[in-house]
Amino acid sequence: MEAKKLGSSVLYGLAAILILAMVSSLIFSLILRFTSLQESSISVLVTVVSFISLFAGGFITGGKGKQKGLMLGGLTGLIYSLCIFLFQYLGYDTLFSMKQMIYHGCFIITAMMGGVLGVNISSARE
């Protein structure tokens, strides 16, 4: 697989993750602003939407790459986690807690599963 195709497929997946994260953040913030719900009452839903976003990003990456879905999905999840880590470390001067490390490990695994499924579904259509 050439590096240009690998890079562009990972960028498509990362863009999808970030777009889904921004849209879901907007929706959740509007729900919290205009209803009496508290942040603690929707925390599980936020986590589920995060996992769905990572799975979708891995799926798009695998579909665009058309091969090596495990590697492409893992790379997408790893770059996403690295961006979040850098934002937290450089912006807030804190490292990941153990809970966050577990979440991000699961995010990477979820993106890998999405990548594998994306490759298999894209190759089934051809």
Image (cartoon, grey):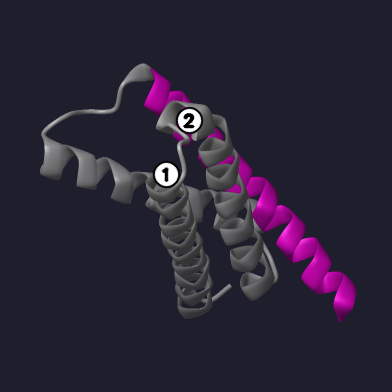
Residue 56: mark in rendering: none
Looking at the rendered structure, the kind of residue marked 1 is: Leu
Q: Nearer the viewer, residue 124 or 85?
A: 85
Looking at the rendered structure, the kind of residue marked 2 is: Tyr
Q: Which residue was labeled with disc 2?
A: 103
For the point 69% across and 66% down, the residue is 67
Quadrant where the N terminus sits is: bottom right
User: Quick one: SS at disc 2?
Assistant: helix
Residue 7 position, x and y percent, is 45, 72
Nearest to N terminus: mark 1 or mark 2: 1
User: Quick one: SS at disc 1?
Assistant: helix
**Of circles 1 and 2, which is in front?**
1
Question: Quarter-wise, where is residue 120 in the image?
Answer: bottom right
Q: Which residues are magenta?
A: 99-126
Q: Is residue 74 magenta?
A: no
Question: Quarter-wise, where is residue 58 in the image?
Answer: bottom right
Q: Which residue was labeled with disc 1?
A: 32
Residue situated furthest top in the rendering: 98
Residue 119 position, x and y percent, is 74, 64
Q: Nearer the viewer, residue 52 or 73?
A: 52
